[in-house]
Image (cartoon, coloured by chain):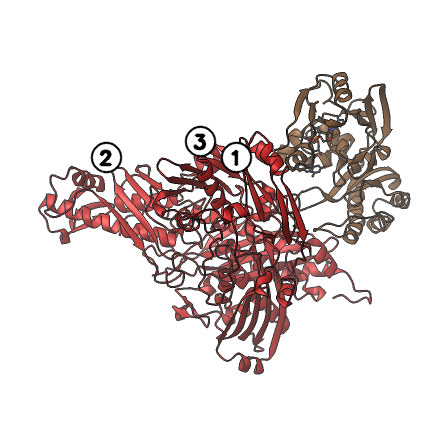
Chain colours: A brown, B red
């Protein structure tokens, strides 16, 4: 890869990273796993003058699955999430996504923080973390602030992260009846449509549902209509579950590319929502 | 006859240890002192006038050594600034194809200028400093639109049609008049990109003292590259050395002479130092040749029993903006193979080659034959569907009988040998065809859509007789028995993944009776190896291996003379037995080839008049092509809700003649199927109407990942050939040729309950899903 020239500094703490960000301003970019940033630099679509490598900051790569809510450090690699038995039990939707993301190289380098901060409209976690109603902790010069996933993901490659902020951790309540199901793009393997579902079930019927969809629009979104329609549906009523998922992406401006048109993406949102609901209900 | 310890054995490839441990030397691994780095400024437009090029900012960068534009090359002494095209068509339109665009660019990625700098980074930075002012012109990428009229890719031609080739055999009108059914279909064989893992790569050096150009290039044809560089650069050919070191995949895309190879060589001559250029993946998508891209308009005449009686065919080939080396030849191969393995005699056809503002198409694994196999195999299924017959039985009905070989086709080829029914029956048995059809019925009742696709292909390869392919027909081999007994083979083919370092050593080991590790096979360097044509068209072993076999015969004959002299015997009483020289019917005496070689080296005990040394160079001129064949069966399930395809089973029974190394053959078939299946399901190069390449990265363009290809169940039959002394046919392209229609037929078969007759590739989920949707009036289509 032959990017434009850049300076490189390694930050050993959040404070140091924030200080460097403050010093270099617009010209600087944080570097975590590099698996979104470096491909852009390779294509010279990004040419930051300064890379601040945060991958070595200690203690930001831990999964704390014993606590409630569960907490995951922003530098936790996909592979670590994918290998976590605790996560598989307590938040299988995230475990599904981590296992189904990229390839071994990507999973061994890329981080949950980087994947979130990048704001890719076809990435998996934006749907999962909205379905888990996760809380994002952002560190800045003046301390930290917390945001809900739905506020964090704002648009295509756009998040609520300020220019001088760093995402430190992500937390969410356990959601053992959750699942993530993905329609892979045949080339990129990103989500053409990806649906994350977290359910609570009472007496064989759905008590509450959070359904979030990535890949379809400019940003992952909650499918409020489906969530409402699912309430009270018996989990053994396959047709009822599928019917509740109709119109999952209604009102969303779907994207088109050479692989899938907007109308197909919209139709697939229903199909994959139904599959994700069925899978979550079966857990 | 030699004993067969090595030939036929599953010997592991001798190439692999260095490849999988990172010790192989690819072009980018060639490190020479004083190397400078090139990068190209490329057109961002499909069609535009170059108004001006401002190189001043780039030249002001202290790291930049030189910038050259089309003007510089055009006026350079001795340089022929247009690139070669090999063809035999009298009225082919061959507009100039400048090494660097002059006045006008005609495709996104057209090279406009070259920058040379001290590092690869500086060269890329400098590309961004060069300001090219363009005046955008109307572009055309749709081949039918281009054929119909303006805008013209080359205004001076006043047309986009580069050639029209009519063909007729038999009485097609009569066949259609007497047909019970006529199946009519327009079949698009989409454009695909070869995507070798190693992109185009080259480093050229000019030794001013010796007036010698050396170019390392990722090429399939080092000698032909040398010849063409001599022509284009105006250099004596013996002052050029072309080396193909390890080459990371070619698939036909490196069977070419690229502008970049010539420009980088010329720049090395100007700067008198090594100049390296390794293209990026993005450039590779834009400026390496593409494959396929034909529209085949077909009509098939058939009798109600499924007998096919005639074909009307129009091949409209999208040539791209310029001719590359074989651009116009490829679609003519489609016509030659329009028959497939079927008997019918009446064909009326036309091939039209059309320029568009897209990258040139050229040979890509199969090169013209996959297109033919695709439409004839689809046609058989369409005829079967129309008549309510089983597609396997329609094939059986139309096969050329195994007793009628050699068989001359209406298109004028002579198929050497074949037994199509046996491979089909074997494949059908492996999949339990009758059982599968039953299961298909049952699953349909449950709303599950299983599809079974057959492809009974035959292909033409072992390119080929020189009469058909001048300068690309024959090949060469040298064998040297070294004084201490090791044996060196110099082969004119230039393998780049096919494994001939192993198979050729297997042959020599058996025939000349030395352990395989005493044999080394050298290739790909014009200063080491006698002239050879190269590796493409599944010819490496069928032609190069045959030349090796001839050289073995020469070595054996001379070794026998040496032994006869020492034993005071008559050479006619001696023979090679189990790799050693012996006396016919007398096991008491033997001499090894190394012993004969040592005697030839010592020179003091040779028959009078016999020259010292034991070596031989031979060339093989194939009397015909070879025609491997086989049956591929693909079973898929299409998900009715999403249109996603799962390949449930894949069986291939191929016949490529004698198997020198079954493991290598299987590897070739595996890779071939992966590429062919990928064309059926995933791959598609897409240009926008104004010429932008929309599938220019591996994030958009889908080459198959491991998990996207099925487990392959392989089997084979062996039908010999007398075309070459090894009795082998090629297997390099067969997998690609056979697989695409098998997969497409399976998917379309799955959708038969929806009334689907044909869907163009790639068979993307969205298309299948759309075809499976109930129509608004409640019926299904
Ligand atoms: C071949 C390939 C396939 C892939 N497939 C998928 C897939 O199927 N699904 C999917 O979802 N993703 C996929 N990805 C993307 C992958 O998940 C990346 O790892 C991820 O998007 C970025 O994480 P990273 O740690 O590599 O971030 P980097 O590339 O280092 O950074 C990405 C961006 O986030 C910023 N950033 C990083 N960390 C922080 C932080 N803690 N705080 C603030 N800003 C930060 C960076 O400045 C940069 O702008 C794929 C990537 C590749 C290369």
Q: CA distance from mark 1 to mark 2?
A: 43 Å
Question: What percent of the width, then of the height, locates residue B335?
Answer: 51, 67
Q: Quadrant of residue B767?
A: bottom right
Q: Is residue B284 left or right of residue B476?
A: right
Q: Is residue B730 left or right of residue B531?
A: right
**Mark 3 or mark 2: which is in front?**
3
Task: Give the secondary structure at mark 3.
Answer: loop
Which of the numbered marks, if any, corresponds to residue B484?
A: 2
The answer to whether residue B339 is above or below residue A95 is below
Q: Which chain is disc 3 placed on?
A: B
First of labels 3, 2 by sequence position: 3
Residue in front for this viewpoint, A216 or B531: B531
**Mark 1 or mark 2: which is in front?**
1
Q: Which residue is mark 3?
A: B32
Q: CA distance from mark 1 to mark 3?
A: 12 Å
Mark 3 and ligand 1: say if the CB distance to the nearest ligand atom is below 8 Å: no
Q: Which residue is mark 1?
A: B37
């Amino acid at each position: 890869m032959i990017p434009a020239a850049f300076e490189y500094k390694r930050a050993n703490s959040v404070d140091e990273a924030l200080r460097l960000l403050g010093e270099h301003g617009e010209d600087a970019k944080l570097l975590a796993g590099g698996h979104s940033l470096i491909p852009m630099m390779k294509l010279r679509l990004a040419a930051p003058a300064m890379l601040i490598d945060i991958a070595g900051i200690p203690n930001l790569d831990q999964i704390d699955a014993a606590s409630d809510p569960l907490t995951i450090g922003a530098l936790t690699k996909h592979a670590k999430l994918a290998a976590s038995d605790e996560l598989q039990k307590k938040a299988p939707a995230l475990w599904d996504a981590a296992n189904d993301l990229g390839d071994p190289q990507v999973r061994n380098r890329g981080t949950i923080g980087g994947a979130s901060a990048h704001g890719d409209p076809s990435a998996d976690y934006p749907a999962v973390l909205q379905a888990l109603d996760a809380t994002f902790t952002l560190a800045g010069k003046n301390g930290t602030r917390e945001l809900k996933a739905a506020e964090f993901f704002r648009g295509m490659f756009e998040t609520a992260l300020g220019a001088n902020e760093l995402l430190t951790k992500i937390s969410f309540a356990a959601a053992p009846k959750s699942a993530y199901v993905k329609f892979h793009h045949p080339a990129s393997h990103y989500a053409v449509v990806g649906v994350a579902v977290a359910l609570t079930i009472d007496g064989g019927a759905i008590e509450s549902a959070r359904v979030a969809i990535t890949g379809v629009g400019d940003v992952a979104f909650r499918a409020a209509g489906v969530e409402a329609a699912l309430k009270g549906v018996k989990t053994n009523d396959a047709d009822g579950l599928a019917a509740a998922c109709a119109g999952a992406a209604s009102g969303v401006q779907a994207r088109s590319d050479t692989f899938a048109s907007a109308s197909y993406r919209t139709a697939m949102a229903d199909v994959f929502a139904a599959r994700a609901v069925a899978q979550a209900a079966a857990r | 006859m030699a004993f067969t310890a090595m030939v036929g054995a599953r010997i592991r490839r001798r190439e692999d240890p260095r490849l999988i441990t990172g010790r192989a030397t690819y072009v980018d691994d060639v490190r020479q002192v004083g190397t400078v780095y090139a990068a190209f400024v490329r057109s961002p437009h499909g069609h535009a006038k170059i108004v001006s090029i401002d190189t001043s900012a780039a030249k002001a960068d202290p790291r930049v050594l030189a910038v050259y534009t089309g003007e510089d090359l055009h006026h350079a002494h001795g340089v022929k600034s247009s690139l070669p095209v090999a063809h035999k068509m009298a009225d082919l339109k061959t507009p100039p194809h400048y090494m660097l665009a002059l006045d006008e660019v005609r495709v996104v990625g057209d090279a406009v200028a070259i920058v040379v700098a001290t590092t690869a980074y500086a060269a890329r930075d400098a590309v961004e400093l060069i300001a090219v002012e363009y005046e955008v012109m109307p572009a055309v990428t749709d081949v039918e639109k281009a054929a119909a009229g303006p805008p013209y890719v080359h205004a001076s031609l006043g047309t986009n049609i580069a050639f029209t080739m009519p063909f007729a055999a038999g009485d097609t009108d009569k066949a259609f008049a007497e047909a019970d059914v006529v199946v009519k279909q327009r079949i698009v064989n989409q454009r695909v990109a070869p995507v070798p893992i190693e992109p185009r790569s080259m480093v050229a050096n000019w030794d001013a003292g010796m007036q010698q150009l050396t170019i390392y290039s990722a090429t399939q044809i080092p000698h032909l590259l040398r010849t063409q560089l001599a022509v284009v650069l105006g250099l004596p050919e013996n002052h050029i050395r072309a080396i193909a070191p390890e080459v990371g995949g070619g698939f036909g895309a490196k069977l070419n002479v690229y502008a970049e190879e010539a420009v980088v060589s010329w720049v090395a001559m100007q700067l008198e130092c090594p100049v390296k250029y390794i293209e990026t993946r993005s450039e590779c998508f834009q400026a390496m040749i593409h494959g396929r891209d034909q529209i085949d308009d077909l009509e098939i005449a058939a009798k109600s029993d499924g007998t096919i009686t005639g074909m009307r065919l129009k091949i409209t080939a999208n040539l791209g903006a310029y001719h590359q080396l074989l651009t116009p030849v490829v679609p003519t191969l489609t016509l030659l193979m329009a028959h497939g393995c079927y008997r019918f005699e009446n064909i009326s056809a036309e091939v039209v080659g059309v320029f568009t503002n897209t990258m040139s198409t050229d040979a890509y694994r199969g090169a013209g034959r996959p297109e033919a196999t695709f439409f004839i195999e689809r046609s058989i299924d369409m005829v079967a569907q129309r008549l309510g017959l089983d597609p396997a039985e329609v094939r059986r009905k139309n096969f050329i009988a195994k007793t009628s070989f050699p068989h001359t086709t209406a298109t004028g080829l002579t198929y050497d040998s074949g037994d199509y029914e046996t491979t089909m029956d074997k494949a059908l048995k492996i999949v339990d065809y009758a059982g599968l059809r039953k299961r298909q019925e049952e699953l349909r009742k449950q709303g599950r859509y299983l599809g079974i696709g057959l492809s009974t292909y035959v292909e033409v390869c072992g390119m080929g007789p020189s009469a058909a392919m001048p300068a690309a027909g024959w090949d060469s081999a040298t064998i040297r028995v070294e004084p201490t007994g090791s044996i060196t083979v110099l082969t004119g083919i230039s393998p780049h993944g096919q494994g001939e370092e192993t198979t050729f050593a297997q042959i020599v080991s058996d025939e000349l009776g030395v352990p395989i590790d005493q044999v080394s096979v050298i290739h790909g360097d014009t200063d080491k190896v006698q002239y050879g044509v190269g590796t493409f068209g599944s010819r490496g072993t069928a032609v190069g291996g045959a030349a090796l076999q001839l050289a073995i015969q020469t070595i054996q004959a001379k070794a026998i003379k040496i032994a006869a002299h020492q034993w005071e015997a008559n050479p006619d009483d001696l023979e090679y037995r189990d790799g050693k020289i012996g006396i016919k019917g007398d096991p008491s005496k033997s001499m090894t080839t190394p012993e004969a070689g040592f005697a030839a080296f010592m020179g003091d005990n040779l028959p009078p008049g016999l020259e010292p040394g034991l070596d031989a160079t031979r060339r093989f001129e194939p009397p015909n092509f070879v025609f491997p064949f086989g049956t591929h069966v693909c079973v898929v399930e299409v998900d009715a809700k999403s249109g996603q395809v799962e390949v449930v089973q894949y069986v291939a029974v191929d016949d490529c003649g004698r198997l020198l190394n079954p493991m290598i053959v299987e590897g070739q078939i595996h890779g071939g199927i992966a590429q062919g299946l990928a064309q059926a399901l995933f791959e598609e190069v897409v240009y926008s109407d104004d010429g932008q390449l929309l599938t220019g990265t591996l994030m958009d363009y889908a080459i198959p990942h491991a998990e996207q290809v099925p487990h392959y169940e392989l089997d084979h039959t062996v039908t010999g050939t007398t075309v070459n002394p090894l009795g082998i046919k090629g297997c390099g392209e067969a997998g690609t040729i056979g697989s695409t229609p098998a997969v497409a037929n399976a998917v379309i078969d799955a959708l038969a309950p929806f009334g689907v007759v044909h869907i163009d590739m790639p068979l993307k989920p969205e298309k299948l899903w759309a075809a499976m949707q109930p129509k608004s009036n409640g019926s299904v289509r």
